[in-house]
Every structure is written in C-alpha cells, then in structure tokens.
Image: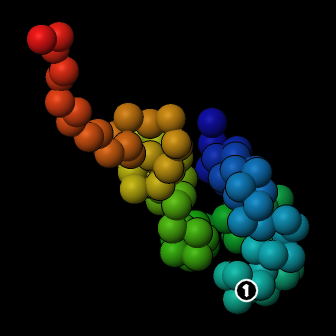
Amino acid sequence: MNKLERLKKAVAYLKGKQIISTQNDIVIKMNGNKSNISSALNGKENYLTDGFLMKFCNTFPEINYNWLITGESHMLNSDTNTNNNSSMENQTLVAQPIVTGK
C-alpha cells in the first residue's frame, strides 16, 4: 500500500467515524487550500508531501503519522486504537467476593 492508498484509507476511516463527511470538511479542519488538498487526495506528488501528511495527522491526531508515511505499525495511534467497548484493556474490572455455602 502506498502513501495515497493509506491516505484514502485514513479518510475512509474518518468518514466512517463521522469525523468528516466530505473533502471540504478536510479543507475546513486543516484550514487549507481546497485545490491543494484536492491535488494531494488525488495523488499528485507535488502536493502529497510529508509536510501535508504531517498537517493531516496534526489535524486528525487519531491517525498515526508513521503509518501514513511508511506503512509500518497501525493506522490509529495507540490511545485511539483502544476505543472499542469490547476491548478488555479499556474495561475496569471490579473484584467480587466469593460467597461459599455455610
């Protein structure tokens, strides 16, 4: 998977989580130029730069910059990677006394 494919996967994730709905939402949140962001999202190398990807990750901190640049590790940063209610890491366990028959 190349940078563009990873960026598109990250955008799809953000849409799925309803953080953004449209490309224009990215423009607004990044406080960027619509044409430049469109060019980056369409894979034009002059716009799909490490600096653009850094700004994207600063705007959407749940996305792991290292993953976006290299493809290594996970798409989500570890603190947002455990926001799943079924995750045991995210649940508080309470000790209950064991009651035995008398």
Question: Which image quarter holds the N terminus?
Answer: top right
**Side (left or right) of 35 relative to 46:** right
Residue under the point 72% across and 66% down = 19
Question: Which image quarter holds the C terminus?
Answer: top left
Residue under the point 77% across and 84% down = 28
- Given the image, on which type of amino acid does mark 1 rest? Gly
**Residue at the limit of the structure toward the left, as seen here:** 102
Disc 1 target residue: 32
Residue 29 versus residue 101: which sits nearer the camera?
101
**Side (left or right) of 43 relative to 98:** right
**Side (left or right) of 6 relative to 11:** left
How far across and how far down the image is residue 18, in percent?
A: 76, 61
Residue 87 versus residue 94: which sits nearer the camera?
94
Task: Tell me which corner region of the image, top left, top right, bottom left or bottom right, holds residue 100.
Answer: top left
Q: How many discs mark residues in the rendered view?
A: 1
Visual colour scheme: rainbow
Q: Is residue 78 visible?
A: yes
**Residue at the limit of the structure toward the top, as seen here:** 101
How far across and how far down the image is residue 44, in percent?
A: 77, 62
Q: Is residue 8 visible?
A: no
How far across and how far down the image is residue 57, in percent?
A: 54, 68
Q: Is residue 69 positioned above or below 1 on the image?
A: below
Residue under the point 76% across and 51% down = 16
Residue 63 versus residue 69: which sits nearer the camera?
63
**Residue at the limit of the structure toward the front, as seen here:** 102
Mark 1 is surrounded, within 10 Å at the Cα level, by few (under 14), some (14 to 19) or many (20 or more) other residues, namely: some
Task: Tell me which corner region of the image, top left, top right, bottom left or bottom right, holds residue 88.
Answer: top left
Q: Is residue 59 positioned above or below 98 on the image?
A: below
How far across and how far down the image is residue 30, in percent?
A: 67, 82
Tell me the element at label 1.
loop
